[in-house]
Image: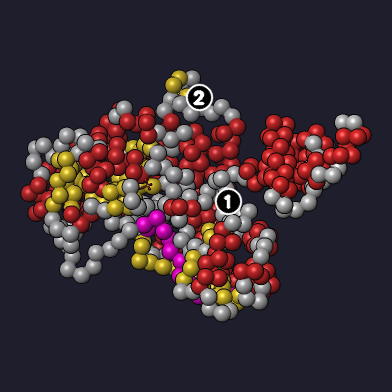
């Protein structure tokens, strides 16, 4: 550019905008180049310059320096590079929250999964014989020891377990199920639909509230594929009710020459009563009661990764494994490694409540939670500002994912209220907390935002995240 041209350009602020090359030399641009690479940085710088130019044309703002434009480009790149699936603080009070990823893995499971990701593993390779092996070999013995079952296999999740079991044992044949157990678990999983998709003929018996042994007996014909028992995990029928206990159902099935399949849902491998919680049917009990096949989830009370466990009689598990669907539903090496490590923790029940996060959260005492609430309330009060009150309050958490739906656990949370009682302000605060770099997710309860502390372990990280809350004073 000649000096004369430069002089005339200087008259228009538009021309004062730095060129792309200049901006790329700014300090923020060097950081952007380092983090995001040349192509993305150059594009972001161009966009930032274009935006400034548009703003100037619209009469908004003045000229910008290369450093300012580079900073704008960097901020945009950083924001876009933020992972979509990122950690949040689950302060909802629901320990196994399906929308928040259910169980948090034990450190042992994290380490095992990471090792499996970094390296080749003997996934389907028998190291003793140098022959082909099976991926189930890594966990079969562990599962059988913990459940008392003869054999076991794993699939993608419990919905998949139910699907492949029904398809293998009851395709084109009636599957007998009580009308009181035709459950829906979250929109997409409805037992009658899964049964049909599996190719089974739905053979409903009994009524919504009462099903008797004779209902099952009368329904069995030579064509029957199986009897299905479903643990009504997410609701309870009370009052004038009758159901056939699994043990009796096992006898009816055996007399009729058909297998009994028990879908436990959130089956647990440890007796929760041992840890001061309400007893939830264990897989071992379901097997001992005579079910031929039991299915349950990996990421509910078991406290591991998403997976579906199928345990039971050897010849039935062998048939399930031969179903071509198995290939479509199998688990990968990363999850398998995490499952194996999680299962191993169960062999030391004394330390299970320390090592398995799900159980650790569920067994936290109200006193422990109260002490944590008392530590945190005075740290958060100044961040929230004068417009909000915050105080420790008793609250009740739930297990979630359908387990023991009517049982709640006494705990303590932080209750935040707008001093003027405005629900709109509380909603805006909840919104701002969800937008933090590490989002904080609480629950709104009668004009208060309740932060249930049951699943909060890293207090320092939590305080650091909330400290980034900008404009809380404006919300107030
Ligand atoms: C949760 C549940 C399922 C589905 O299990 P996923 O692991 O979510 O696929 C099936 N049956 C019952 C009884 C359940 O509680």
Residue at x 33% of width, y 40% of height: 161
Q: Quadrant of the C terminus?
A: bottom right
Q: Is residue 74 visible?
A: no
**Label 1 neighbour load within 10 Å: few <14, some 14-19, many 20+:** few
Residue indicated by mark 2: 127
Q: Is mark 2 within 8 Å of ligand 1?
A: no
> In the picture provided, is 318 more to the left or to the right than 361?
left
Q: Position of residue 154 (x, y in %)?
A: 39, 38
Say whether residue 217 is magenta.
no
Q: Quadrant of the N terminus?
A: top right
Residue at x 59% of width, y 29% of height: 119
Q: Nearer the viewer, residue 425 or 191?
A: 425
Q: Which mark is residue 459?
A: none
Main secondary structure along the magenta-highlighted residues = strand
Q: Nearer the viewer, residue 213 or 158?
A: 158
Say which element carries label 2.
loop
Q: Nearer the viewer, mark 2 or mark 1?
A: 1
How many badges with numbers are in the image? 2
Q: CA distance from mark 2 to mark 1?
A: 37 Å
Q: Nearer the viewer, residue 435 or 218?
A: 435
Q: Position of residue 409 (x, y in %)?
A: 44, 68
Q: Position of residue 347 (x, y in %)?
A: 47, 48
State whether residue 287 is above or below residue 387.
above
Residue at x 38% of width, y 47% of height: 297
Residue numbers of the magenta segment: 390-403
User: What is the quadrant of residue 257 in the picture?
Assistant: top left
Residue indicated by mark 1: 87
Say whether residue 401 is magenta.
yes
**Label 2 neighbour load within 10 Å: few <14, some 14-19, many 20+:** few
């Amino acid at each position: 550019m000649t000096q004369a041209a430069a002089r005339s350009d200087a008259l228009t602020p538009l021309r004062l905008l730095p060129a792309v090359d200049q901006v790329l030399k700014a300090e923020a641009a060097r950081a952007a180049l380092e983090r995001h690479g040349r192509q993305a940085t150059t594009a972001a710088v161009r966009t930032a310059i274009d935006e400034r130019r548009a703003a100037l044309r619209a009469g908004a703002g003045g000229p910008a320096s290369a450093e300012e434009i580079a900073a704008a480009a960097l901020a945009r790149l950083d924001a876009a590079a933020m992972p979509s699936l990122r950690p949040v603080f689950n302060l909802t009070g629901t320990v196994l929250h399906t929308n928040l990823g259910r169980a948090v893995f034990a450190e042992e499971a994290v380490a095992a999964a990471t090792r499996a990701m970094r390296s080749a593993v003997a996934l389907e390779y028998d190291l003793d014989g140098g022959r082909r092996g099976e991926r189930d070999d890594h966990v079969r013995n562990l599962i059988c020891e913990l459940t008392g079952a003869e054999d076991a296999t794993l699939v993608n999740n419990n919905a998949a377990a139910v699907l492949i079991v029904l398809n293998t044992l009851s395709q084109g044949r009636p599957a007998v199920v009580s009308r009181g157990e035709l459950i829906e678990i979250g929109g997409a999983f409805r037992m009658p639909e899964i049964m049909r998709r599996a190719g089974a003929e739905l053979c409903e018996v009994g009524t919504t509230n009462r099903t008797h042994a004779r209902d099952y007996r009368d329904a069995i014909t030579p064509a029957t594929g199986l009897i299905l028992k479903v643990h009504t995990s997410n609701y309870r029928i009370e009052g004038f009710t009758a159901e056939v206990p699994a043990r009796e159902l096992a006898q009816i099935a055996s007399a009729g020459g058909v297998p009994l399949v028990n879908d436990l849902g959130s089956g647990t491998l440890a007796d929760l009563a041992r840890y001061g919680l309400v007893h939830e049917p264990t897989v071992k009990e379901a097997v001992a009661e005579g079910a031929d096949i039991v299915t349950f989830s990996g990421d509910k009370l078991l406290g591991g990764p998403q997976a579906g466990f199928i345990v039971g009689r050897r010849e039935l598990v062998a048939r399930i494994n031969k179903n071509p669907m198995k290939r479509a539903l199998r688990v990968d090496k990363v999850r398998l490694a995490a499952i194996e490590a999680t299962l191993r923790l169960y062999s030391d029940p004394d330390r299970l409540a320390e090592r398995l996060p799900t159980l650790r959260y569920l067994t936290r005492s109200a006193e422990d939670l109260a002490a944590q609430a008392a530590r945190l309330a005075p740290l958060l009060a100044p961040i929230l500002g004068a417009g909000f009150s915050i105080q420790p309050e008793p609250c009740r958490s739930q297990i979630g994912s359908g387990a023991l739906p009517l049982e709640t656990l006494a705990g303590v949370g932080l209750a935040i209220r707008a001093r003027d009682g405005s629900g709109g302000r509380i909603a805006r605060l909840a919104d701002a907390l969800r937008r933090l770099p590490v989002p904080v997710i609480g629950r709104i309860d009668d004009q208060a935002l309740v932060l249930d502390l049951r699943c909060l372990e890293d207090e320092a990280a939590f305080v650091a995240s909330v400290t980034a809350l900008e404009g809380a004073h404006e919300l107030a």
